[in-house]
Image (cartoon, rainbow, N blue to C red):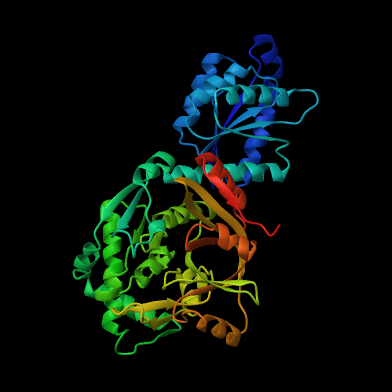
Amino acid sequence: MARIGVISFSDGRDYVHDGIRDFIATTEDKLVDRLTAAGHEVVRGKEIVATNTGASAVARQVAAAGVDLTVFHYAVWAFPHFTMLAAGATPGPLLLLSNIDPVQPGMVGMLAGGGALDQIGRVHTRLWGDPDERALIDKIGVQATASSAVASLRGSTFGRIGGRPMGMNTAVANTDQWQSVFGVDVEEIDQWEIVRRSELADQKEVTRAREWLETNAAGVHYDGKKLTPELLERQIRSYLAMRELIDEWNLDFSGIKGQPEMTQYFATMDIVEAFLNDPYDWNGPKETHVCATEADMDGALTMQLLKHIARTPVLFADVRHYHADRDIWDLCNSGQHATWYAARSDDPAENLSKVHFYPEVFFFPAGGASVHHLAAPGQMTLARLTRRGGNYRMHLMLGDFETYDDETNAQLMRQSTFEWPHAFARLDAKADDFLSRFGANHIHAVPGDHRAEVRAACELLGVELDEFTRG
């Protein structure tokens, strides 16, 4: 969960502060207790702010703890310039919180402080209510999660392996804009590094990995041409090469161009991308590493933000086909989906038992294994960062992944590319509206309803929100 700072403000008159100090402390205790019970780490101000010097000192102390979100807490009327001084010493996101009490005018204090912040253009969020209300604690948690996710982007590095794939403009972003809006640097690395390093991989680990896939998958369908043990091992070697690059260059997330050079002359990167995005490999549990196929920069950025909001692997897919008779979208991509989505289980064996590795299709003459499965059903948040006129916007919608009987599943998958992974999605968007507005061919998803966190993150980033609904 998030790390939340809490600073309580008071009246600047000594004789008034002396009479309300205990009340402020009691209300702060309750707030901290409820946030802690919800799983958050709370950093409290060392004292209640009742002087101008205290406002700056307490804010610096809380900020030094590296909090994701700072809550300015108003249980009583508080001098507004204390808010301004504390905000000046608080570099991160602010949330102003007042209690609802007819005796003590905390709401007045919050509005006075918030109005002063508005006058100087300092962005902040406001909430009010009793900490005993779980809904209020949840709303604070939403803001904290969004703040943490946004903070995780700043100072991070994206590894761009290769350049623009097949003239795909939406896969390439302006690196200066990334720095100014998101605080993300880009490290340019040639695909030759994957080829070169793959030849140096430890054969014992390569063999062990291939045998692990053969043992745990629903099937590895060798055909002697497009998929052989040697080609599968080449993909495994490429995965190990990427792990080296990630460690050596301290990459936080990445993307691999793949097409056309790798897919025509070396091997597809499907195994690489799927298992980087997975929370495990043949060596056991691991941190997921967001990796976008076709080196899709804005796709990877969307995935990285969603990863830190949902704390799960993130799905990457093409918007491949719309089955109008079912109002279902086939989200299908060349082997990219993390195998975790096959069952969304903590047990890799359960997920892999639903995964087939098929020979690659005619698009990819170099061959290799395609990671085929059907995403497990459930509610999903779908999102994508795109640009309009050079400015970022976030497409956002809720949806559900669905599955049917085996015959229907197979029939629907064969209408596009059966060998690739699929997700059948019922979107909270009208088809005509979606196809008219959506600004990319790739879309991304995480389980559950995380729209509130994505909205809050967009507000923090100054990114336009483009939310789809059925209305």
Q: Identify the residue at horizontal 45%, vertical 69% (top origin).
A: 337
Compared to residue 369, the image places residue 428 above or below, namely above
Which residue sits furthest bottom? 224
Residue 239 x, y percent position in the rendering: 31, 68
Image position of 369 (left or right of 412): left
Q: Position of residue 421 (x, y in %)?
A: 47, 75
Vertical position of residue 239 compared to residue 128: above or below: below
Give the percent coordinates (x, y) of residue 106: 71, 25
Image height of 169 relative to 353, above or below:
above
Q: Residue at x 56, y 63 (%)?
A: 435
In terms of image quadrants, where is residue 226? bottom left
Residue 367: quarter of image: bottom left
Q: In the picture provided, is 101 more to the left or to the right than 317?
A: right
What is the x, y in percent for residue 11? Answer: 66, 16
Position of the C terminus, as image quadrant, is: bottom right
Residue 72 appears in the figure: yes
In this view, the residue in front, 411 or 281, is 411
* Residue 2 appears in the rendering: no
For the residue pair 61 and 237, the one nearer the viewer reads as 237
Q: Nearer the viewer, residue 418 or 433?
A: 433
Q: Residue furthest right?
A: 102
Total numbered labels placed on residues in the image? 0
Residue at 58% in and 55% down: 396
